[in-house]
Amino acid sequence: MALPLNKPKALLADKGYDGDAVRSNLLMRGILPIIPPKANRREHIPCDFRRYRDRNRIERMFGYLKHQRRIATRYDKTALSFASFLNLAAIRKWLPNFVNRT
């Protein structure tokens, strides 16, 4: 696995990555794997489902961004323009929640 310069403390992944090789590789690098065990796993491995909930929030945000046609098809030619529209879409998602709370 290629990792960024800043080493993460934990890795949130779905059941598809529940393998002994993946888990041991992460633990050897000092990264806590937060992966729920598959249903057919013989020995039960505990999972912190409170931290795993954050993955669902991230997946929902990506799903929302994919509904924005300009972002999903990447019409923009430059990386700066694409990142700017990602920011605008995120603000559009966040703004109704912020306005209703104040």
Image (tube, rainbow, N blue to C red):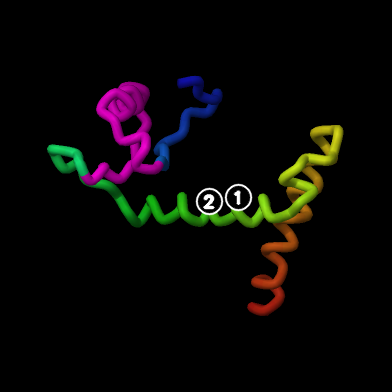
Q: Residue at x 73, y 59 (%)?
A: 91
> Is residue 27 toward the left or the right of residue 1 in the image?
left
Say which quarter of the image contains residue 26.
top left
Can you tell which mark lies on residue 59?
2
What SS does tag 2 mark?
helix
Q: Write down the region rendered in magenta.
A: 14-39
The residue at which mark 1 appears reads as 62
Q: Residue at x 60, y 50 (%)?
A: 62
- Which image quadrant: the C terminus? bottom right
Mark 2 neighbour density, 10 Å: few (under 14) some (14–19) many (20 or more): few
Tell me residue 80's x, y (percent).
Answer: 82, 37
**Does 9 lie within the magenta span?**
no
Q: Residue at x 50, y 24 (%)?
A: 3
Q: Is residue 90 shown above or below 44? A: below
Q: Mark 1 to mark 2: distance in Å?
A: 5 Å
Say whether marks 1 and 2 touch (CB < 8 Å).
Answer: yes
> Is residue 10 toward the left or the right of residue 80 in the image?
left
Say which quarter of the image contains residue 1.
top left
